[in-house]
Amino acid sequence: MTTVAQRRAVTRHRQKASAQGLARVEVQVPKIHSALLRRIAETLRNDPAAARHLSEMVGAHTAYTSGQTLGEFFDGLPDISGPEFDEVFELGQDRSLPEDIEL
């Protein structure tokens, strides 16, 4: 359990960061990517030139914009289909129409 002083210190710290234009973000990623994500966050926070470059690079690979529908987003992704995936996606199900059933 935290003390009142600890809670106030955290609140002050977060208010200062917010006043500097920073936003608190919590994400969950696989453990192997956590160090990378911390380095990316540090770059975005501390190096404006590198942050712009990083943002452009990442933005090119994550093309979703809030005005898009989910279908438009998926249509914009690169086509990765090919015969090497046919076996993986073959469901082996009967695709015929269902029989009529009397109720």
Image (cartoon, rainbow, N blue to C red):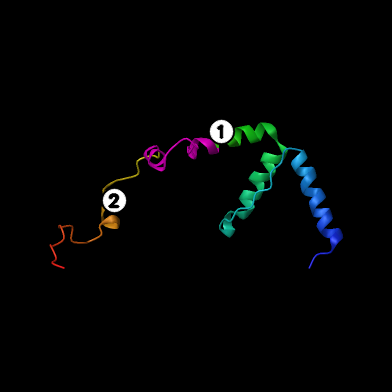
Q: Position of residue 33 (x, y in %)?
A: 58, 54
Q: Which residue is mark 1?
A: 56
Mark 2 Cα shell of 10 Å, populated few (<14), some (14-19), many (≥20): few
**Residue 23: within the magenta?**
no
The answer to whether the residue labelled 2 contacts the one labelled 1, judged by CB atoms less than 8 Å apart, is no
Please, what is the three-letter code of the amino acid marked with disc 2? Glu
**In the displayed structure, would residue 46 be above or below residue 30?**
above
45 vs 94, nearest the viewer: 94
Mark 1 Cα shell of 10 Å, populated few (<14), some (14-19), many (≥20): few
Q: Which residue is mark 2?
A: 84
Name the mark on residue 97: none
* Quarter of the rendering containing residue 3: bottom right
* Quarter of the rendering containing residue 71: top left
Q: Position of residue 31 (x, y in %)?
A: 59, 59
3 vs 95, nearest the viewer: 3
Q: Position of residue 46 (x, y in %)?
A: 72, 39
Closest to the camera, between mark 2 and mark 1, is 1
45 vs 25, nearest the viewer: 25
Q: Position of residue 87 (x, y in %)?
A: 26, 56
The residue lying at 60 percent from left, 37 percent from top is: 54
46 lies left or right of 26: right
- Mark before the other along the chain sequence, 2 or 1: 1
The residue lying at 48 percent from left, 39 percent from top is: 64
Q: How many angstroms separate mark 2 from mark 1 (CA)?
A: 32 Å
- Of the 4 image quadrants, the one containing the N terminus is bottom right
Please, what is the three-letter code of the amino acid marked with disc 1? Glu
